[in-house]
Image: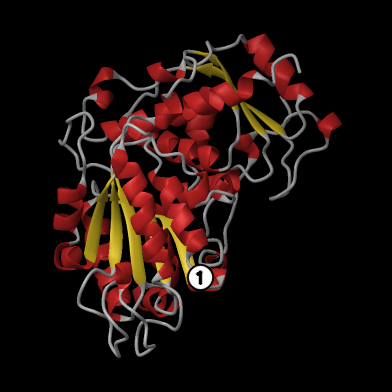
Amino acid sequence: MSSSTAAPGSSPLPDAGPSSLCAREPHVPADQLVAEMVPPPRFDSVRFATYLPDPNQPSQSEAVRVLEGFAAGLGGAHAVGGGKRGFFGFGRAKAQPPAGPRGVYLDGGYGVGKTHLLASLWHATPAEPALKAFGTFVELTNLVGALGFQKTVQTLGEHRLLCIDEFELDDPGDTVLVSTLLGKLVEAGVALAATSNTLPGKLGEGRFAAADFLREIQGLSARFRTLRIDGEDYRHRGLPEAPAPFSDEEVMKTAFATGGASLDDFAHLLEHLAKVHPSRYGALTDGVRAVCLTGVRPVPDQSTALRLVVLADRLYDREVPVLASGLPFDRLFSEEMLNGGYRKKYFRAISRLTALARDAKGLVGA
């Protein structure tokens, strides 16, 4: 296996053989964090028009309608003293931010297209990219850690919109931190949009997290309008079952035949993830066109499992296919994990890795 490493944003030469994610130690300067808070590559081209509502779930069409109005209401000058009209088409021009909803919360199970809608809102908002930000909860907490609280408030306070995907309700300390930050941003006139995961111990399948989200953000709850989005995981709607894992030989042969591919032993990759901060997992995959893994096996503990979840999210965002040997991805997590407080994260990771495994199937023998 080659240990050569491509420069960020580039791919290895086709005749150089596959690179190794384990050989990469990416570093992201703090001053790049805000500039990089845009929808991930998977969602570069999504728009409200490309969201396909399930005809059996009218709440999906309604969410699109309301979000289009929300985006249109963000036009014009900044909310504070800018003579801006109220959100959702309510209210007239005001000198101060209106007391009504300053944000929207997309409430639904995994795989119903919440991130697609959140990114569509970002794209539809009539403002320069520098005036709107999009990131996950983890990326937002990393920003506060890099810039400091006051500098983060100052920087994001100039924005018109902040979209937060996968608000981490299962981390009480960070939830309080971000809730306080959002309060400051609302005071500055920033509009908010968010999705979230589920709190630990809330195990109901298909359960919605709106009540938990509104409770955890405490004083901000009145500032959010909740949009419930019903539906099943779209990644499995009418799609074939996940392909069976390939042999080690097939994975290695494909890795060497695919320009820009990486090739790693699964256990070694899990060990390497422990040495890289999760905020850098996106940079870890820069320039990688396919991830090839040998010897996939159950993850040994919850800390390792949560790191793998973050990597799966970043690979899914970047549409990087994953070709693997060993066990199928639906056997990554133990029954105890799948019945525990982080079950929603694990099911999301299984769903996303399964989709990426389907994408990788066409690479074999190509």
Res 91 quadrant in image:
bottom left
User: Horizontal and vertical percent for residue 71?
Assistant: 42, 65
Name the quarter where the C terminus is drawn. top right
Mark 1 burial class by Cα count in 10 Å: few <14, some 14-19, many 20+ = some
User: Horizontal and vertical percent for residue 54?
Assistant: 38, 34
Name the residue located 74 percent from the left edge and 14 percent from the top edge: 365
User: Horizontal and vertical percent for residue 345?
Assistant: 33, 35
Q: In the depicted view, which residue is nearer to us: 300 or 106?
A: 106
Res 55 quadrant in image:
top left
The residue carrying mark 1 is 126
Name the residue located 17 percent from the left edge and 30 percent from the top edge: 204
User: Horizontal and vertical percent for residue 191?
Assistant: 35, 70
Does 298 sit above or below residue 244? Answer: below
Q: Residue 268 vs residue 113: left or right?
A: right
Res 231 quadrant in image:
top left
Name the quarter where the N terminus is drawn. top right
Q: How many marks overall?
A: 1
Q: Residue 220 vs residue 294: left or right?
A: left
Label 1: state its secondary structure. loop
Residue 97 appears in the picture as rendered: yes
Name the residue located 46 percent from the left edge and 80 percent from the top edge: 76
Name the residue located 60 percent from the left edge and 35 percent from the top edge: 320
Does 235 sit above or below residue 137? Answer: above
Amino acid on which the number 1 mark rests in the picture: Pro
Residue 145 appears in the picture as rendered: no
Q: Residue 291 vs residue 68: left or right?
A: right
Does 206 sit above or below residue 195? Answer: above
